[in-house]
Image (cartoon, rainbow, N blue to C red):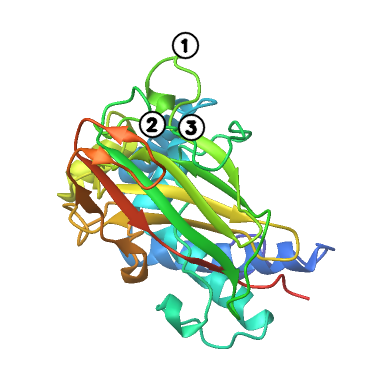
Amino acid sequence: MIQIDAEDITQAVIDRLDECRDARFKQIMTALVTHAHAFVREIQPTEAEWIGAIEFLTATGKICDDKRQEFILLSDTLGISMLVVALNQLKGARAAGQGRLEATPASGSPTEATVQGPFYWENAPEMPLGADIGEGMPGEPAWYTGRVTDTAGQPIANCCMDVWSGDGDGIYDMQMGDDAGMRLRARFYTDADGQYRFWSIKPSFYPVPDDGPVGDMLRRMGRHPNRPGHIHMKVYKPGFQTLTTHLFVADSVYLDSDAVFGVRDSLIVPYTEHAPGRAPDGRELDRTWHSAHYDFRLAPAAA
């Protein structure tokens, strides 16, 4: 019998993968077909609703460019990005012999990861420790310090810290126009004791881009688009698992309702407010400034 009916079509599609020579791809596509067909059976969309879904994905692709990735934003706001991050870090910790991944850095487990987000820009300028990447930008100055160690507490020297954030108004350089260039981002390398230090700003909460299909989806879902204030860190060195994470401002709004589900309790950091005056690096400041301290732990690369 040539005809394939609704009750048979899922298995028929899976059977067409019999000649697939890539075992992992075959596993992925089998699961995709199985779950996608189950989704359709559960919601039983009208043909108009299904065309609407296709048009939504088409619009999501059309708004993407070299500085905006709407599909990452879609993945982030549906919690899928954070699920992928959490599962992979747990898998990496187990592969490195860490066992169960704990949420508290003091336990000796790796620092928790979170989403990269859509605003990462490769090849940020390399700057010396103590440099100010927030000079002239909106926002109150903040002095960042800490150490990078392995999970046994041994310092990791010459470890790259790729840092980026929005300004005090929550706006990233990528949103400032083609002539803005890179701002509030840099790469620092830890010293012989694994220490880092630099100036930036105290980040503010901000909305994810909501002028496209994902913004329309959030409004229809009855959700806000806001993220709590945070600064991004990508910490890496050969021999260790790359860590992509944030430091969240402890007194920021939206910590309990981050639009991309990225907040981790262990990444919430108090920012101490200081009156104008001399900073730890000897700099004289004529306005209020802040300090934030955080120590990162990297897991060894999986064997």
In the rendered image, residue 59, in percent from the top left (x then y), is placed at 41, 30
> Could you tell me which residue is drawn at 59 percent across and 69 percent down?
149
How many marks are shown on the rendered structure?
3
Ranked by sequence position, the earlier of labels 1 and 2 is: 2
Q: Nearer the viewer, mark 3 or mark 1?
A: 1
Q: Which residue is mark 1?
A: 179
Q: Give the residue type that dot 1 points to.
A: Asp
| Other-residue count near label 1 (Cα within 10 Å), few / some / many at <14 / 14–19 / ≥20 | few
Residue 104 shown left or right of residue 148 in the figure = left
Q: What secondary structure is found at the residue carrying circle 2?
A: loop
Q: Which residue is mark 3?
A: 61
Q: What secondary structure is found at the residue carrying circle 3?
A: helix
In the rendered image, residue 54, in percent from the top left (x then y), is placed at 42, 39
Q: What secondary structure is found at the residue carrying circle 1?
A: loop
Q: Residue 97 occupies which quadrant of the picture?
A: bottom right
Residue 210 shown left or right of residue 75 in the figure = left
Residue 134 badge = 2
Q: Nearer the viewer, mark 2 or mark 3?
A: 2
Ranked by sequence position, the earlier of labels 2 and 3 is: 3
Residue 258 badge = none
Q: Give the residue type that dot 3 points to.
A: Gly
Ranked by sequence position, the earlier of labels 3 and 1 is: 3
Q: Quadrant of the C terminus?
A: bottom right
In the rendered image, residue 40, in percent from the top left (x then y), is placed at 40, 60
The answer to whether 148 is drawn above or below residue 278 in the figure is below
Could you tell me how far apart the alpha carbons at marks 3 and 1 are, in whole angstroms?
24 Å
Could you tell me how far apart the alpha carbons at marks 2 and 3 are, in whole angstroms?
33 Å
Residue 53 shown left or right of residue 270 in the figure = right
Q: Give the residue type that dot 2 points to.
A: Gly
Residue 92 shown left or right of residue 225 in the figure = right
Front position in the image: 288 or 57:
288
